[in-house]
Amino acid sequence: MESIHKKLAIVGEVGAGKTQLIKVISEISPFATEAKSTEDIGKDFTTVGIDYGRLSLDQDVALGLFGLPGQKRFSMLWEMVRKGLWGLLILVKYGDELNAEALNTLLEFFQPTENSLPVVVGITHAENADSDALDELSGRVEAILLEHNTFAPIMPVDPRQVESSLMLLELFLSLNQFAEPEANPNEYMNYDGGVEVNG
Amino acid sequence: MKRVACLSTIQSLSNDTSSSFNVIDIFNSTRAYNLEHQITGSFIVNNDYVLMIVEGESTHLGNIIFKTRQDNRLMDFSMIMNVEIAEPEFTSWGIKLLKQGNEGQERIYEKLNNIFKDDFKAKNAIDKKRLQCFLDAASKLKTNQTKVKPIESSTSLKAESSSRPAQVKDFQYQNSMISLTGWPKPGKIKLTPELIKICARLVGRPHRFEDLLQEKLVASEAALVARLNELHGLGIMRKHRVDEKPTLVGIKGGLSNKPRVSSTDRFSTVLKNFLSASKH
Ligand SMILES: Nc1nc2c(ncn2[C@@H]2O[C@H](COP(=O)(O)OP(=O)(O)O)[C@@H](O)[C@H]2O)c(=O)[nH]1
C-alpha cells in the first residue's frame, strides 16, 4: 500500500513552543515510530536544523511536524517544506512583542489564500492571560491576516498539554475538509453583500 | 489601466461605538468582485474614514466605484484621484487599518506619502482634511515603528463582542442562510470541536441552516441552535437572503462548500478516528 505522509509546518519565534508541541504530538502516536529508512522524511531535515517529529497514525499514514523559525532569514528552511503542506501553524508567544513584519513576510511567502493552505494561529504562554489582552493581540494578528486575504482561527494553545495540541489537529482537519484547492471565481461573482443580523 | 482613489466616511451605527464590524463587511462586499476582475488596491481605514485605492481596467473600476458609492454605510463619497497607469502598484486587493498598533506597514506609508501623493486631488476642504488624516496616520506609523507598543491600545477589529447585546433568542435560524464574518475572538469563547466544525463551515461562507443540520455537525438541532446562538452573541454572524447562492465571501480558497478532500480520503479518516479515540 502506498504510504501517506502529510506535512504540518509550525512556525514561530524562539521560545514560542514549537519543540514542545512537536514532542507532545509525536509522543501520542498510536504507532511506534521506528525511523524507517527512506520513508522517514524527517531525516534530511534534522540535519539542517529543522525541528522534526511525526504523528504516526497507522503503519503507512503519518503527519510530519516541522518546526521552523519565524524570521525571514530562515526562509530557505520554509522553502524546504512549503510544497504540498497540509497546514501552517503559526505560534505567537503571548507577552512578547508581536513581530508583525515577520508575520507579514511569512504570509507573503506561504500565500495561504492562493494555495488554499489552512492556517491556524496559536497563542502560547497564554494560560494566565486576561481575555481582553488576548483579544487585543488576536485583533492585531487578525488585521495582518486580513491584509493577506486570509481568515484563520486564532486561539490560545498550551503545547505542553495533549488535549490542547489535539485541538489544533482537530482544527486543521476541519479546515482541510472545507477549503477548496481551486476556487471557481464564477461561483462568487454575483455576491452582493449580506444583511447584518444585528444591524 | 487606471488607478482611482476615493474618500468616504463610515456611517456609525447608532447603537454601536465601534464601526469596525461594518468596515470589514464593506470590504468583504467588494472582495469577490475585485478578485474576479483582477482589481488590486487597498481599502485603507483610519478611524471613521476610508480611503479606497483601486487599480484595474476602467469598466471594472467603474462598477466597483458605483457599488461603493451606493453603499449606505458610507457617506460623503468623493473621488480624489483618477489617473492612467502603466502597471499596478499593488499586487492584490486588501484592507489596511491605519492604527498605531499595526506595525509593519512601511509599504503603505511609502505609497501614500511618496508614490501617490502628487496624484491626489482633494477638491474641497473636507476632502483635504480627510486625506491629510491618512497621510499623517501613515507617517505616524512610520515614526512609531520602533517604539514598543502599549498593550492597551485597542484594535479596530475588536468590533462586536461586549458592546453588542444581540437579541439572540429572538433569532430564527430555520429557513435562513447564515455566515460568520470571521473566527471568534479567543478571549470571548473557547473553541470546542463542535464550534470548530461550525466555524470552519461558516467563516466567509453562507450556509443554509438546514444544510448544517443535515451535516450532523452536532448531536441535535437544539445543540446546533445553542452553538449558533453562542456565535451570534459575539456579533460575528450575518444573515443572507435565502435565495442567495450558497457560496462566497470573497476569499479565494475559502469559497466553495464542497469538501476539499472527499470523505474517503484516507488520511482524514485515519486522523479523525484517532482524534475521536483520543477524547476518551
Ligand atoms: N507556561 C507555558 N510554557 C510553555 C508554553 N509553550 C511552551 N512552553 C515552554 O516554553 C519553553 C520553550 O518552548 P520550546 O518548545 O522550546 O520553544 P521553541 O523555541 O519554539 O521550540 C519550553 O520550556 C516549553 O515547555 C505555554 O503555552 N505555556
Image: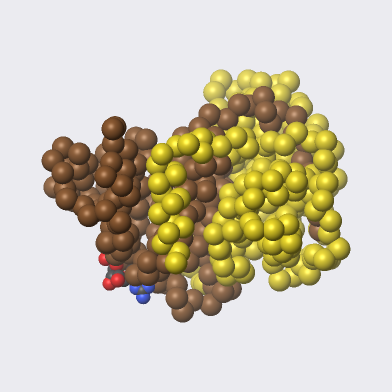
Chain colours: A brown, B yellow
User: Which residue is at the front of the view, A89 or B270?
Assistant: B270
- Dividing the image into 4 quarters, which one contains the N terminus of chain A? top left
Measured as percent of width and height from the top left, residue A178 is found at 56, 41
Q: How many badges with numbers are in the image?
A: 0
Which residue does the image show at 52% across and 42% down from the upper left?
A177
- Quarter holding ligand 1: bottom left
Q: Quadrant of residue B15?
A: bottom right
Q: Quadrant of residue B258?
A: top right
User: Which residue is at the front of the view, A96 or A65?
Assistant: A65
- Dividing the image into 4 quarters, which one contains the C terminus of chain A? bottom right
User: Which residue is at the front of the view, B93 or A40?
Assistant: A40
Q: Is residue B41 visible?
A: no
Q: Is residue A177 above or below residue A144?
A: above
Q: Is residue B258 above or below residue A150?
A: above
Q: Is residue B271 left or right of residue B197?
A: left
User: Which residue is at the front of the view, B257 or B163?
Assistant: B257
Q: Is residue A23 left or right of residue B187?
A: left
Which residue does the image show at 57% across and 30% down from the upper left?
A183
Q: Is residue B38 left or right of residue B74?
A: left
Measured as percent of width and height from the top left, residue B185 is found at 59, 63
Which residue does the image show at 64% across and 50% down from the upper left?
B216
Q: Is residue B263 visible?
A: yes
Measured as percent of width and height from the top left, residue B68 is found at 78, 38
Measured as percent of width and height from the top left, residue A193 is found at 77, 41
Which residue does the image show at 30% across and 52% down from the upper left?
A55
